[in-house]
Amino acid sequence: MDAPDASHSRIDIPKISATARHRFLMCSPDHYAVTYEINPWMKGNAGRTNPETARQQWDALRAMIEQFADVDTIAPTEELPDIVFTACAALIYGDKAIPSRFRNNEREPEELVYRKYLAARGLEVIDPPNNLHFEGAADALFDRSRRRLFFGYGNRSDLQVAGFLAENLDVEVVPLRLIDDRFHHLHTCFLPLTGGFFLYYPDAFDDRSLNLLERKISPRRRIAISERDALQLACNAIDTGVDLIMHACSDDLKGALAKRGFKVHCTPLDQFHLAGGSASSLTLRLDEPVLEESDADRECIATRTVHFKGHLIQRGVLSEMSEIVHREGGDFAVRHFAPGVHAESDTELTVDINAPDDAVLDEIVSLLLPLGGQSHQPEQHPARIIKVTQDGVAPESFYSTTIFPTFAFIDGKWLQAQGQRMDVTLRVDRSQGHPDVYCSLIRDLKVGDEIIVGTDGIRVDVPRANVGGGEDFKFMSSEVSSERRVETAVDRVARDMIDIKARKGRIVVVAGPVVVHTGGSPYMSKLIRGGYVDALLGGNAIAVHDMENCLYGTSLGVDLKRGIVVGGGHQHHIRTINTIRGAGGISAAVEQGIIKHGIMYEVTKAGVPYCLAGSIRDDGPLLETMMDLVEAQ
């Protein structure tokens, strides 16, 4: 290996013995073809594979691998065209093997073939639970520097498998949610490399997973790839040490890898791309080493039992519950289901909700409460209470109320919240010698106030007519709204602004939240950067929703990229206000890196003066908002 360039001397170069050789399992493509569609790559490709070309590409890949590693083979089966993708066979760790349990019926027959091979190899075969899907090393990739396993879920494998793997392999498991079905397996968008480096395509993961990756992996060891490389399946490469084998690689990516001591070897595999696989898909690592014991946390998922009762089928609660859980990054297992036998009979459903961490679990359960869901056994999980440490700022994980009557389980009793209203906190008052619960605005909170956090011990009594009736708060969700985007003639305004600046005049912009709601925030930000805004006048709302967009990608709960209402998104604005108040204001939030883009970010960075005038409707409000309207004017 060539010595690293001096300009990159601070980058760790992986060290590997020149005699180290890995061992991989492959299966010849005698019967490979696209005969069905179970991922986006396969659509329209039935009958398009060329058997002769596929064989030539497979042979070339095997020959290249054998320059750096050893290859074992398994006999192909005529009825199983995808058995060529051996990465899906199992996950092997030392002398243990966890065989796959495929989600798609088309691949289920492969399970028996793989299982027989694993047993014949003398491995301890540990079957995953019957009700769970798991697709082997395609969704489970070991960190090359520590006893850690990255686990992809959301498309093929179930989140619950993470706990099963942690327990049976005694490793730390990091669940990563896949949100783009083009990257149906983890190894299509994520690749651990020798020396603790990682290739990954950020857009394939949800925000929580990206934040988790940033915490687990230092910036200098993360190599984010472009969409162009991602769609060439560059992450679906074979790591043999310092030598990486893949289908194709851009010059930029090749250079980034070379600076870290890796050599890229490309060989055409487009025949296998027709089915959504590439180099890594065609191999299974057989000699995965068991690294030294670590003190890492083995608890990798959070679980809560939730019970529903009522007209669940008629009201569509079952489908809505399922949609919420999966959309928010969790999954569920049905513990009990008893459908009503008559039209007016209640249906009962008990489910275990699983999430990658407590914060996601609380979010999911909070969205299920308005559907009539109730957490089981409040005696074991009473309401959690945290004291306020800063006037006008709630604890970060405060429970945000809905419009429906809300109860908290405290000191062995269900207590109804007084003064029910939406988007406020639940404050516990013990001044009368016993606990009472009140709905309290964030701005009214004082140091020492007790606030309920999370969803433990919370019950929402939803009128039966509303259960499953889509009563989630949906301001601005109508197709007709005065605050939706309208096309206007902007040429004249643009010319006027240019003329004013040419005359060295000053431009004061008066803007409302419609700027954010209609997707105009990036354009106004560009005007500020260009020096076309000398002062900004607005209300509490434009600042709140601009920063909500920065933190959550929504404005009043509407996803601005997709134009749809996000479940539970009505809470985003109040949580944004609380976050900014907790930081000490807008300028402090920008300085601390909490707010990284948007209108308020740009005016703060550019030193543009602004005035935010309040109203009696304002939640929070922001610390900078002037509630004396005469003074604001």
Image (cartoon, rainbow, N blue to C red):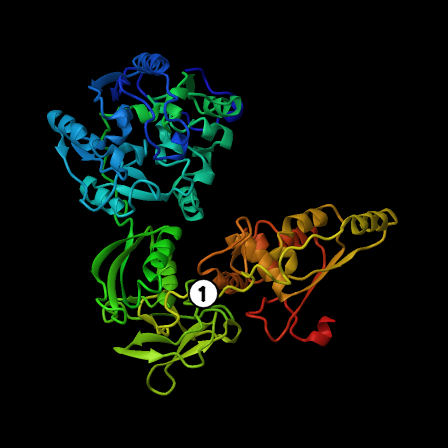
User: Where on the picture, by quarter, is residue 93?
Assistant: top left
Residue 103, compared with residue 399, is above or below; it is: above
For the residue pair 480 and 220, the one nearer the viewer reads as 480
Is there any visible trace of residue 125 in the rendered image? yes
Q: Position of residue 205 (x, y in %)?
A: 42, 42
Q: Position of residue 539 (x, y in %)?
A: 66, 66
Residue 307, compared with residue 205, is above or below; it is: below
Residue 197, compared with residue 399, is above or below; it is: above
Q: Amino acid at mark 1?
A: Asp
**548 with respect to 61 (left or right):** right
Q: Which residue is mark 1?
A: 472
SS label for mark 1: loop
User: Where on the picture, by quarter, is residue 343?
Assistant: bottom left
Q: Position of residue 367 (x, y in %)?
A: 39, 62
Number of callouts: 1
Could you classify mark 1 by the number of other residues whose Cα lies within 10 Å: few (under 14), some (14-19), or many (20 or more)? some
- Which residue is drawn at the image coordinates 75% and 53% (left, top)? 533
- Which residue is drawn at the image coordinates 64% and 54% (left, top)? 599
User: Where on the picture, by quarter, is residue 135?
Assistant: top left
Q: Position of residue 203 (x, y in %)?
A: 47, 40
- Which residue is drawn at the image coordinates 72% and 74% (left, top)? 631
**350 with respect to 426 (left or right):** left
Question: Which quadrant holds the C terminus?
Answer: bottom right
Which residue extends farthest front? 343
Is there any visible trace of residue 246 in the rendered image? no
Which residue extends farthest right? 503
